[in-house]
Image: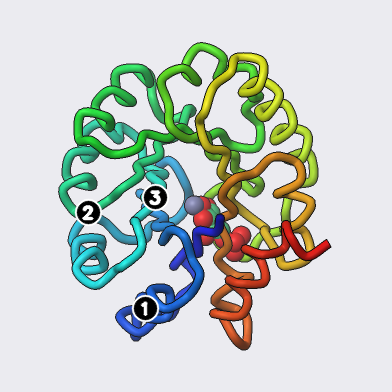
Amino acid sequence: MIAPSILSANFLTLGNEIEMLNNSSADYIHLDVMDGVFVPNITFGQPIIKQISSIAKKPLDTHLMIVQPERYIDEFADAGSKIITVHYEACTHLHRIIQQIKKNNILAGVSVNPHTPVYLLESIIYEVDLVLIMSVNPGFGGQSFISFSYEKIKQLADLRHKKSLQFLIELDGGVTIENAQLLYDAGVDILVAGNAVFGAKDPTAAITLIRNSKNNR
Ligand code: DX5
Ligand code: ZN
């Protein structure tokens, strides 16, 4: 699956960008919420997500790069998110926060920064619907893929297999048409792509190319 990130979209014509995604083979719309504290950048919040939700035909995948996400989770759910992912590094009481997300009857995800080892998730993977591996340091679109992420995907896929769990594996940062196939092969279920989609001449075609790269061998 593919979840295009609107971080690299043209916000002056955001409605058109969402329409493009509605008519594409995108599986989700990835929304990067940044607070300028957890990450060195600020993006958008609940009011904009609410507006996106009013026209989006694909489920909204909200990636919270914010401290104390428990303060806003219910609002992000009410705004129309179908997945909410919080950062392992931003949550002192991660277990409680995951339950808070699930109480809203949506999917709960946990994300790890590039420096955070996958084994630290061993006690929480029983509770989550999704694990998001960051393959760049979060904060900006268009950064280069950190290659150790392949190792982390494989470790996580192994862990999932060993424990007979079902959570989805999502990967975010530096995804390109070139590396998509290797990433799916390593065990990724959902690829997030910002620059590779919105920086392409034909974003709709780029979405389909990335999404189908698993079968293009
Ligand atoms: C980065 C965000 C990503 C970003 C990915 O902090 O979480 O979702 O949009 O952008 P690309 O695909 O351009 O690396
Ligand atoms: Zn993201």
State the image coordinates of residue 208 (x, y, percent, origin top left): 61, 72
Which element type, helix, strand or loop, lies under badge 3?
loop
Q: Which mark is residue 36?
A: 3
Q: Earlier in the sequence, mark 3 or mark 1?
A: 1
| Front tag of 2 and 1 | 2
Q: Amino acid at mark 3?
A: Gly
Per the image, the residue denoted by label 1 is: 11
Q: Is residue 108 visible?
A: yes
Q: Amino acid at mark 1?
A: Phe
Q: Which mark is residue 80?
A: 2
Mark 2–mark 3 Cα distance, whole angstroms, equals 23 Å
Which element type, helix, strand or loop, lies under badge 1?
helix
Residue appearing at x 25%, y 61% in the figure: 49
Quarter of the picture holding the C terminus = bottom right
145 on left or right of 197: right
Mark 2–mark 1 Cα distance, whole angstroms, equals 19 Å
Q: Nearer the viewer, residue 144 or 37?
A: 144
State the image coordinates of residue 181 (x, y, percent, origin top left): 76, 56
